[in-house]
Amino acid sequence: MLLDNHNRKINYLRLAVTDRCNLRCNYCMPSEGIDFAKKDKLLSMEELSKIGELLVQMGIDKIRITGGEPFVRKDLMALLSNLRNNPGLKDISITTNATLIGPHIDQLKELGIKNVNVSMDAINRATFERITRRNHYETVHNNLIRLISEGFNVRINFIVLDNQNTQDIIPILDLQKHYPVSVRFLEEMPFNGGSKKFNTIKWDYKAILSHISSTYPSFELIQSPKTSTSINYKIAGHKGNFGIIPSFSRTFCGSCNRLRITALGDVITCLYGPPKINLREIIRGNSPEYNIKRAIERVIGNRAITGFEAQKEHKGVFDNSMTSIGG
């Protein structure tokens, strides 16, 4: 079991497989993109598999595959197959923009990987294309409906952006009226490659909930696991549910059970903090199993208690793009 210095159990790994993405969402990176990592700096699928195996041995029982866009990696399915062979791993999930997942849906079902988060910040085509700077709306929408219809546990992640997509909050919320999905609204975070800076947000979790209540005044709070980052609600008569994630307000730090490893091998113990150690050279050196385990234990034993405290350690944190941090 992995316990941090605040006695929080760490059992959830967000494992990034790439920093590349085929969209250019305006809240994530500049239109020209960022300086993406060279291939030799990225962890190979074999290295990612080994790191996953070692961390499962240490107590990780849930791994979420992130990016960038994970399906940009052509050999992603090989990694998922390898991870599935770890008997201590209870759940493998994926966060994707759903542009490239289509050809892999059948194999995901065969592997028993049913939890898929789809990043979709608009239900209106024009708004979607304005935010993503790409014209993949039809593909994303079709893949989303296919995932739902084929029985995947789908959660839609919608980042609320002032003066951009707030008019889509209620229309996308209505998806959970008709389908058994969870629509989750996230506060905007300033991890956008330095293209925008802010210290406060208009659309915090309270404002989002207030906006929803103007259309749906009656909903019930769902009791969620203590480690959940989302505050979840159910509207009577709706097939699904909705949630709000205070990702900028950081109200959930006290029960954080997450560890991040980027595609470059950086270990991040808090989204708002700096990388604590890099595993790339360790796994490519002598005695990688022993040294990786010791390195993980060391950084887990020195975690910030909140995202606000972690932010103080990292003056340039908001110059990063979310795609390079690992989602």
Image (cartoon, rainbow, N blue to C red):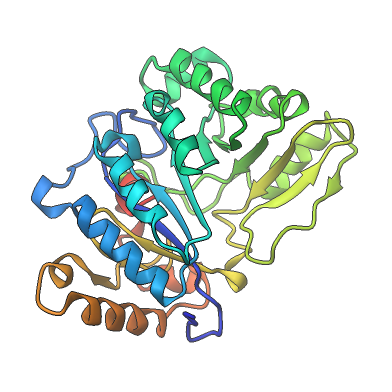
> How many numbered marks does the figure carry?
0
37 sits to left or right of 306: left
Whole-percent x and y of residue 60?
A: 46, 69
| Residue 314 in view (yes/no) | no
Whole-percent x and y of residue 216?
A: 85, 32
152 sits to left or right of 297: right
Picture layout, residue 160 above or below residue 177:
below
Whole-percent x and y of residue 246?
A: 61, 53
307 sits to left or right of 76: right
Picture layout, residue 172 above or below residue 308:
above
Q: Residue at x 52, y 30 (%)?
A: 120
Q: Nearer the viewer, residue 165 or 232?
A: 232
Location of residue 251 (image quadrant): bottom right
Q: Residue at x 27, y 45 (%)?
A: 18
Location of residue 105 (image quadrant): top left
Q: Nearer the viewer, residue 153 or 117?
A: 153
Q: Residue at x 13, y 68 (%)?
A: 281
Q: Residue at x 82, y 37 (%)?
A: 213
Location of residue 182 (image quadrant): top right
| Residue 275 in view (yes/no) | yes
Whole-percent x and y of residue 37?
A: 16, 47
2 sits to left or right of 210: left
Picture layout, residue 309 above or below residue 52:
below
Q: Nearer the viewer, residue 277 or 205?
A: 277
